[in-house]
Amino acid sequence: MRFEDNWSSATLVAIRDLTPGIREFTVRPDHYACAPYALGSHIKVGVLIDGQPDVRSYSLVGEADAAGYRIAVRRAEDSRGGSRYLWSLQPGARLQVTSPASLLQVDWQRGHYCLIAGGIGITPLVGAAQALLRKTPNVALHYAVRSRADAAYADELKATLGERVTFYAAGEGERLNLAQLFATLPSDAVVLFCGPMRMLEEARRAWASCGRATSDLSYETFGSSGRFAAEPFRVRLRESGEEIVVPRDRSMLDVLNAAGHEIMSDCRRGECGVCAVDVVAIEGEIDHRDVFFSEHQKHENRKLCPCVSRAHGVVTIDTLERADAI
């Protein structure tokens, strides 16, 4: 396991609507110490989905705040239910949360930093901009949204970055051309990206076409962002032939664990690869939503991350469980 979760009780102390579809929640753990946390950190939050306990992971907004941990949650009707649960809460609600942890690797010796956000992907980059600006003024943020009204933290970002933040509203004909942007970056620049999967795929292609080192593009994405809309599909277990239906609003990982198959997991964000299972056959198509496997590995369809990835049709997997295992 990459993280050992340290859970504590917490209180929802404040709610703030950032846009019509994004709400900020300030959560203060009991005995909160306001300790600094690593750039790109997230916390896990205990939620109730149809009355059953579950866990969701959210990036922390900004740096350590005396009020508590800030997270921003987009209300998504087609999600697995975590956003609906949090949006139903009022200040004073009690929650369970983990301590912050980060998977993001940043080279602090570089001279230029380019931050790229798509939609709700802005959440980890608010704190990244604050931290990096203390090191160098050579920090720029490019923020792509559907409309100007969808740009969460716009005022805060303008106050922090001034002219070094650029907004792109697709609905107003403003498109972020990643290939063009990357071609203008200094040779020592690194990119920190957080956004939907399609945007990440475009960023990877544009970065490679510029001849840039793969390690100089660091990224996060969100597991709800796939190439296709979520729909029910079936998972077939190779060893037993058992078939399990994965509903539209639940992950393959959760369904397999609920059925007693105990798939090991860690980040539940498609980033660490701990939960990866072997794909034996696919009758349909896999919608890989992780950022752990390379594009080549995803094309091979030999493995998938059940915490975020989905499928159309039937996917046969091998969990490496064996009836005669001790």
Image (spheres, rainbow, N blue to C red):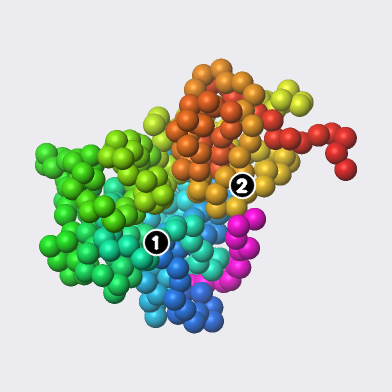
Q: Is residue 244 visible?
A: no
Pick the front one: 57 or 1: 1
Side of 9 relative to 70 (left or right)? right
Q: Position of residue 273 (x, y in %)?
A: 57, 45
> Above or below — where is 320 with respect to 12?
above
Q: Main secondary structure of the magenta part?
A: strand
Of marks 1 and 2, which one's residue comes earlier in the chain?
1
Question: Which of the 4 quarters of the picture holds residue 169?
Answer: top left
Residue 15 on the magenta span? yes
Q: Nearer the viewer, residue 294 or 307?
A: 294
Question: Is residue 326 something one can see in this rendering?
Answer: yes
Q: Please, what secondary structure does the residue beneath circle 1 have?
A: loop
- x and y percentages locating residue 13 in the rendered image: 41, 73
The kind of residue tagged 1 is: Asp
Span shown in magenta: 1-17
Residue 264 lies in the magenta-colored region: no
- 314 to 102, vertically: above or below: above
Quadrant housing residue 235:
top right
Name the residue tied to disc 1: 107
Report the amino acid beneath label 2. Answer: Val
Instruction: Give the quarter of the figure containing the C terminus.
Output: top right
* Disc 2 element: loop
Which residue bears the numbered disc 2? 274
Quarter of the image where one finds residue 138: bottom left
Residue in view at x 26 percent, y 60 percent: 112
Q: Is residue 173 left or right of residue 121?
A: left
Residue at the extreme top of the image, as rendered: 283
Query: Residue at horizontal 33%, vertical 70%?
Result: 131
Whole-Å distance between the Cαs marked 1 and 2? 24 Å
Q: Residue at x 29, y 56 (%)?
A: 188
Q: Residue at x 22, y 51 (%)?
A: 185
